[in-house]
Image (cartoon, helix red, strand yellow):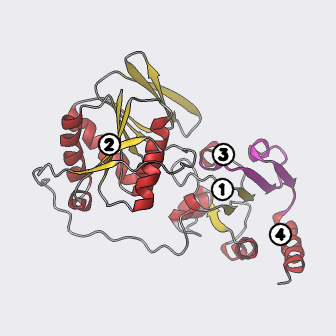
Amino acid sequence: MKVLVAGEKPEQVITTASYAKSLNPAQIVAAAFKPLTENELAMLGGAGVEKLIHLPEKYLAAGAAASAAALAELVKKLDPNLVLIYASKKGVEICGRLAQRLDVAYASEAFAIERDGNGFVAKRLVLGGGYVATVSLNSKPALASVKVSAPETSKGPKPAVEEFDPNVVAPAVDLLETIKPEKTRVDLEKASLIVSVGRGFKKKEDLSLAEELAKLIGAEIGCSRPISGDLKWLEEERHIGLSGKRVRPNLYIALGISGQVQHLVGMRDSKTVIAVNTDPNAPMATESDYYFVADLYKILPLTIEILKKKLGS
């Protein structure tokens, strides 16, 4: 079995390759639109990748249609059994367009892929994350965009690097400009400590309590969907959940978050979870290692005061 993995960023390619390795394929080939560093190449080797195909970055810069067109030619050349694309926002769009070009069925944003006879089965969350849909992928290649948490990969022999420019026809729509939002902090998906806020905060100004706690312990600020999507108190990039970021920090502190399933999907891979909520029966209680039934407006100032004394701040 041959697996082709791809992603718009090198770290996404590495993560997807590491997950593909768990399927025990005979060969893993990676495709990337951006050059990889020597360290990243070694990480790919540790993930079991034998060959890296480097596609010109111009296709990624031109948009999802051009990227899918380039990948379609690569798929025809390699004839893999399975194609996995990391499910970033652009990756999901690329995967959909690739499915159309190859005329194959595909699963979007799958969290697990399994072998099933001569085909594959993909598992994905549906209906707000409350249910799991099992999707049979019997075409060749089987195709899925995946948002998976793969274990950290040790370095291995660097894969052979091959340049491939399919010279595909430019898409009918020209991308004139891309405007990236300003990012004030590091990517939540890489954070080891996260303080996350929810509707338990009564007004925007009160978020300063969480921000002070985060500053004291060196954590990043995250939030539930209502805080970023409905109230606009924080940037969308801080939203953790089914349609936001999926994180796996060493410590996740949930403040005033009840824990609806859409949010839990994004943080349940956290190693240790501490939560503060006034509702003893909130869903977050079952997901937490330490659950405090308390008023965050009382417990946060006390916690901050104790930390300042301990840290000498």
Looking at the image, tell me whether mark 2 or mark 1 is earlier in sequence order: 2
**What's the amino acid at mark 1?**
Pro
Looking at the image, tell me whether mark 2 or mark 4 is earlier in sequence order: 2
Marks 3,4: beta carbons within 8 A: no
Q: Which mark is residue 249?
A: 1
**Neighbour tally class for label 2: few under 14, some 14-19, many 20 plus, Cα within 10 Å:** many
Is 275 contained in the magenta span?
A: yes
The percent position of residue 94, horizontal first and vertical second, equals 30, 47
In the image, is residue 210 above or below residue 283?
below
Q: Residue at x 37, y 46 (%)?
A: 92
Q: Is 214 in front, or is 7?
A: 7
Q: Which residue is mark 4?
A: 300
Q: SS of the residue at dot 4? A: helix
222 relative to 103 in the view: left or right: right
Q: Which residues are magenta?
A: 266-295
- Label 3 and label 4: CA atoms lie apart by 23 Å
**What's the amino acid at mark 4?**
Leu
Q: Which residue is mark 3?
A: 268
Q: Residue at x 78, y 47 (%)?
A: 288
